[in-house]
Image (cartoon, helix red, strand yellow):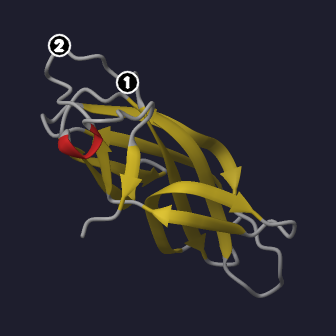
Amino acid sequence: MAFVSAYAFVCQHVLTEADGVPSAIRIAEVFFLPYDPSDATKPRLPAVGVNLFVHIRMTEDDNDPHSMTFTLKRPDGEAKTETITENKIAESKYANTDKTLTAIGRIGVEAKQLGKHEFVIHLDSKPVASAVFTLIQNQSLYAAHPPKSPVVDHPR
């Protein structure tokens, strides 16, 4: 088995076509919150919903089971690790091509800190990719009509 490559990113939606090919919609780096999470006097959203997309490639001779985890690192250094999959064997739809492990999941990230957050992806306990996003406050944007959930947008 030889590791080839890995990538991860955060997006707003993932559509899976009839042939099983996923399409990522609105790859996001910034999530706007209409409040500062550290202000206990304001109503809070329980979590910001993000889609984490992970794709790992191995050589075609790989037949070993693999475990994938992610660690969410917050701006204050807090880190929490979750399992994505355990004992999964990489697959390929076509002969003579690299095998892949793909994981797509909606994750509720508790909106308790502003700043840069990072998902670090591990394959068999080794870091192989990361996806960074930032929670920022933009109170004036939503002063008249606060949203019921955070709005995702690209930085300008």
Q: Which residue is mark 2?
A: 40
Q: Which residue is mark 1?
A: 45
- Of the two numbered discs 2 and 1 on the same chain, state the one appearing first in sequence: 2
Q: Amino acid at mark 2?
A: Ala
Residue 45, x across and y down, in percent: 37, 24
Q: Amino acid at mark 1?
A: Leu
Q: Are marks 2 and 1 in contact (CB under 8 Å)?
A: no
Residue 99, x across and y down, in percent: 69, 72
Question: Which residue is more in the foreground, 86 or 14?
Answer: 14
Outermost bottom residue:
96
Tell me if 41 is positioned left or right of 91 in this view.
left
How many marks are shown on the rendered structure?
A: 2
Q: Residue at x 15, y 36 (%)?
A: 77
Residue 16, x across and y down, in percent: 75, 61
Query: Does dot 2 land on a helix, a strand or a loop?
Result: loop
Question: Which residue is more in the foreground, 76 or 47?
Answer: 47
Asked if residue 155 is positioned above or below residue 42 in the image, the reply reads below
Outermost right residue:
18
Locate the N terminus by quadrant.
Answer: bottom right
Asked if residue 156 is positioned above or below residue 105 in the image, the reply reads below
Q: Residue at x 24, y 70 (%)?
A: 156
Outermost front residue:
144
Asked if residue 134 is positioned above or below residue 150 in the image, the reply reads below
| Res 35 seen here | yes
Q: Residue at x 33, y 40 (%)?
A: 72
